[in-house]
Amino acid sequence: MNTTSAVCMRAPVERIFPLAAEVERWPERLPHYRWVTVLERDADGRRKLLEMGARRGWFPVSWQAVEEVDRETPAIRFKHVRGITTGMEVEWRFEARDGGTLVSIDHALETRVPLLGMVVADFVHAIAGRTLRTIKTLVEEPSPR
């Protein structure tokens, strides 16, 4: 199962990246996220073990993932280590475009059960799409004076 969600945002990478990388604050910013708890953090803060909970509509989902923040590329990577999506690899990419940034989230998960892969892909795509649309709204709002 491979899915990609992408949205072009009228904002520079420097405005978008911190919102995406600060996953601990997602529940404040993204209404479909129920919680994000940091379980472990490395010394330089680049890698974190997280427990995350979100909703797709009324249906709750949760998982654990290791987040790796690459500020130089920039990119954000997640490796799901617990839950139905164990083994999933996720990468957020940021590509400067005229007047904005194309933000994409790639998900890759190998599964031996095609039906399970289709169900997971549907959930992942819906949650990722809502995440991107909400961040787009946040970064495109005029800054408070």
Image: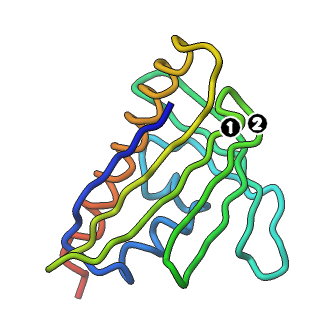
Q: Residues within 10 Å of mark 1 (few under 14, many from 20)?
A: some
Quarter of the image where the C terminus is located: bottom left
Residue 84, position as x, y percentages in the image: 67, 26
Q: Is residue 11 left or right of residue 50?
A: left
In the rendered image, the residue lying farthest to the bottom is 145
Residue beneath the point at 34% across and 43% down:
129
Residue beneath the point at 21% across and 76% down:
97
Amino acid type at circle 1 is Trp
Q: Which mark is residue 97?
A: none
Colour convention: rainbow
Q: Secondary structure at mark 1?
A: strand
Q: Is residue 122 left or right of residue 113?
A: left
In this picture, is 98 found above or below 110?
A: below
Q: Residues within 10 Å of mark 2 (few under 14, many from 20)?
A: some
Residue 42, position as x, y percentages in the image: 83, 72
Q: In the picture, residue 41 is in which quadrant? A: bottom right
In this picture, is 98 found above or below 117?
A: below
Q: CA distance from mark 1 to mark 2?
A: 6 Å
Q: Is residue 65 left or right of residue 76?
A: right
Q: Is residue 13 left or right of residue 24?
A: left
| Residue at the spot of label 1 | 63
Residue beneath the point at 61% across and 47% down:
89
Q: Earlier in the sequence, mark 1 or mark 2?
A: 1
| Residue at the spot of label 2 | 82
In the rendered image, the residue lying farthest to the left is 99
Amino acid type at circle 2 is Arg
Q: Secondary structure at mark 2?
A: strand
In this picture, is 130 found above or below 77?
A: above
Q: Are marks 1 and 2 in contact (CB under 8 Å)?
A: yes
Residue 106, position as x, y percentages in the image: 46, 49
**Toward the viewer: 124 or 30?**
124
Residue 117, position as x, y percentages in the image: 53, 21
